[in-house]
Image (cartoon, rainbow, N blue to C red):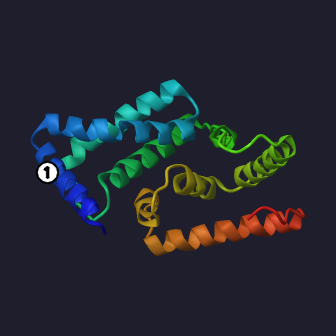
Amino acid sequence: MSEANKVDLAEEVGLINEARTNPEAFGLLYERYVAKIYNYVYFRVGNINDAEDLTAKVFFRALKSIGNYKHLGLPFSAWLYRIAHNLVANHYRDRSKTSEVSIDDLVVPDTRKAVDPEAILETKQDNTYLLQLINDLTPQKRELIILKFVHKLSNAEIGVIFGKTEGAIKSLYHRTLTELKDQARKDGKTRIH
């Protein structure tokens, strides 16, 4: 761990401890993480109103439970993502909804490269195929891919969210990638890595 990360983590732990008795300190944690948690929730529920409501519930629950928070060496955001994960699961269970935002919306074209229409078409076809493969995964595997590649979370952080060990997440990640590669091979898509 770099010196800067140690300082950031120590500063965060101090802020968390202060937030146990000072709502203004919790407000700083809220400002630091609200956008990340909102984005996570929005991509899971696909509705702005529900995402706003659930995000508010995440932080309300965190504020209410911060006295019970135990620092395990992971960023505070891992705990917030776990709360969000549970609330989203409850949201679907309570409302019997199954629709999520398609991860087609997650592809951002790289505009730094020179314009080559043939390459753009080929890349778009590859992206469309890959996104279809990911959409065909189980909800847990799809969420793992989103947390890993969109939110850039570590296996340990994802483990907290899923309520699993880091080793279990590594194993799930390996199985997911193997499943994607095997399906791509079956479909004759050797360019997908």
Q: Can you name the residue that lies furthest to the front here?
A: 114
**Residue 60 in sight in this render:** no
Residue ranking furthest to the top: 49
Q: Judge the density around disc 1: few (<14), some (14-19), many (≥20) Cα neighbours within 10 Å.
A: some
In the image, 160 versus 192, the foreground residue is 192
Residue 193, image x, y percentages:
73, 65
* Numbered marks: total: 1
Residue in front for this viewpoint, 121 or 130 = 121
Look at label 1 and name its amino acid: Asn
Q: Is residue 28 above or below residue 147?
A: above
* Residue 182 in picture, x, y percent from top left: 79, 69
The answer to whether 120 appears left or right of 76 in the picture is right
Judging by the rendered image, the residue that carries numbered circle 1 is 17
57 up-or-down from 191: above or below = above
Residue 54 appears at what percent x and percent y? 42, 34
Is residue 161 visible from the viewing direction of this image?
Answer: yes
User: Which residue is located at x 27 percent, y 65 percent?
Assistant: 72
Q: Residue at x 49, y 29 (%)?
A: 50
Q: Residue at x 76, y 67 (%)?
A: 181
Residue pictured at 40% horizontal, 35% vertical? 55
Q: Nearer the viewer, residue 32 or 179?
A: 32
Give left or right: position of 177 versus 143: right
Query: What is the x, y in percent for residue 73?
Result: 27, 65
Q: Quadrant of the N terminus?
A: bottom left
Q: Secondary structure at mark 1?
A: helix
**Residue 25's quadrant in the figure?**
top left
